[in-house]
Image (cartoon, rainbow, N blue to C red):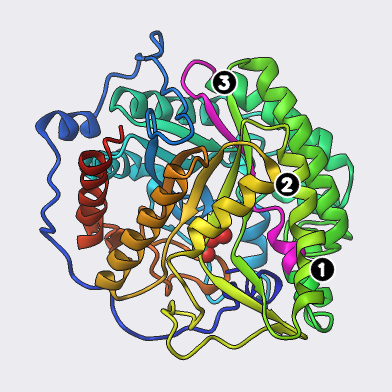
Amino acid sequence: MHGRVCEVRRYSRDESGKRAQSVRGAGVMPTRREAMLAGGLAAGVLAATPSLAAPSRAGSLEGFLWGVATAAHQIEGNNVNSDYWVMEHVPGTYFKEPSGDACDSWNRWREDLALVRMAGLNSYRFSVEWARIEPAPGEFSVATLDYYRHVCVVAREMGIEPVVTLHHFTSPRWVAAMGGWEDPQVIDRYARYVARTVSALKGAVRWFCTMNEPNAQVTSKVLQRKPWDIEPRLRADAAKAVGSDRFHMYFLGDSYRVRDNCIAAHAKGREAIKAAIPDAKVGLTLALQELIPGPGGGALYKRIFDAARAPFYAAASRDDFIGVQTYNKFEAGPDGYLPTPADAMKDMFGLPTQPTALAATVREAYTHAKVPVFVTEHGHNTNDDAQRIRHMDAAIRALGQEIDNGVPVLGYMHWSLLDNFEWSSGYTPRFGLVAVDRASFARTPKPSLAAYRRIISGLRQTKNWA
Ligand code: BGC
């Protein structure tokens, strides 16, 4: 998704040319109350804080959070003050197309919440955008903070627990111009932003992800065979565009420095959240593809584990949960991942997407971090919605097995609610349970949205899960 610079599965090379299926009338209808709530709740519903879901115990799904996930830059639209927006517009950029209006969720968030309820879900993971909240250093937008608070309050009123990610890849352009995630100054800047944002959300949000997949760029680095030749020019052009002599994004630059700064920022962010909301549940989310050593791949497997997993498991061991995000299963070879086996289920990128990968990574994360696991992303990039349903069903069943075996799992967030802006691959990939018309932004549920609801209610009956 970040093209050349992120994990292998994200190397943009799909172009199936197929159109998203037309799935109107997929059989998921909102109740009158849901439709009414989505249409407009009174603004001043800030006072009462409904009681919050209790985290589930090992072996049970009491209080389990079933939800979907999105991220601000991928759905809101016109995130013009962000570093990604700058990079999307640099001549010769590696982005296939700019994010533009995305899914216009900045304006259509009520429709999105209504879809969450239509699927019978009790939670929604989404991110708030630093570039909108702090458009210039130390200058916070009260209106933007009010806006996000209002979204969270309305979600709560609809019975949807907000799970808020404070940083999902994008940063303000001024952060990139100052040295970005390579510069240790970012740690305090991030903590200040978190403190301010979280105190604005107090009483409306209890679940926070400090940052999204800070390990992904380290995995890419370990796998990288040679330096990416266009990176220096792109960064120089982006620096010029922001009036600086540097431009550092989360996924560009020295991955090991970025890693260490992210881990330090995560710890400070967690402190800031706990200071404002002592009973908040805080964790970071990791890109964890199932990885096994294949023939001759032991050394590469160990390099990836030591650089891109172990330090993050250690960082997460003081958190309330570890966020697991899984899409693929790879076998390490002597010099990279081994080719996808011919009989494997594949995504639109042709990469292997074994449904059992989720259970395997949940187990790995729990074994090493020793804190409860929260599946903060899991999904399948495909135009074949029937395959998406089979994939989701099998993965959730295997996850259930882990829970029955005693692994504490707090929730499952399917990526994604909407077909959205898949970073450097643009709008071609299809992760959504809901299709979005690129011209009108009309949302059309796919059969997988109703199937998700059925899978959950089936599990509730057969397993007596909450
Ligand atoms: C990221 C999302 C992305 C998804 C699918 C995750 O790694 O957090 O932003 O869209 O993968 O590639």
Judge: label 3 CB < 8 Å from ligand 1: no
Please give the name of the residue rendered at 36% of the width and 24% of the height, measured from the top-left corner.
156
**Badge number at residue 51:** none
Indicate which disc, 2 or 3, sits on the residue closer to the N terminus.
Answer: 3
- The residue beneath circle 2 is 313
Q: Position of residue 106 (x, y in %)?
A: 42, 44
Q: Is residue 142 left or right of residue 160?
A: right
Q: Position of residue 299 (x, y in %)?
A: 82, 75
Indicate which disc, 1 or 3, sits on the residue closer to the N terminus.
Answer: 3
State the residue in front, 213 or 354: 354
Please give the name of the residue rendered at 30% of the width and 27% of the height, measured from the top-left corner.
159
Judge: label 1 CB < 8 Å from ligand 1: no
Distance from label 2 to label 3 (Cα)? Answer: 29 Å
Amino acid bearing label 1 = Arg
Distance from label 1 to label 3 (Cα)? Answer: 41 Å
**Badge number at residue 200:** 3
Tell me the SS state at disc 3: helix
Q: Position of residue 328 (x, y in %)?
A: 53, 69
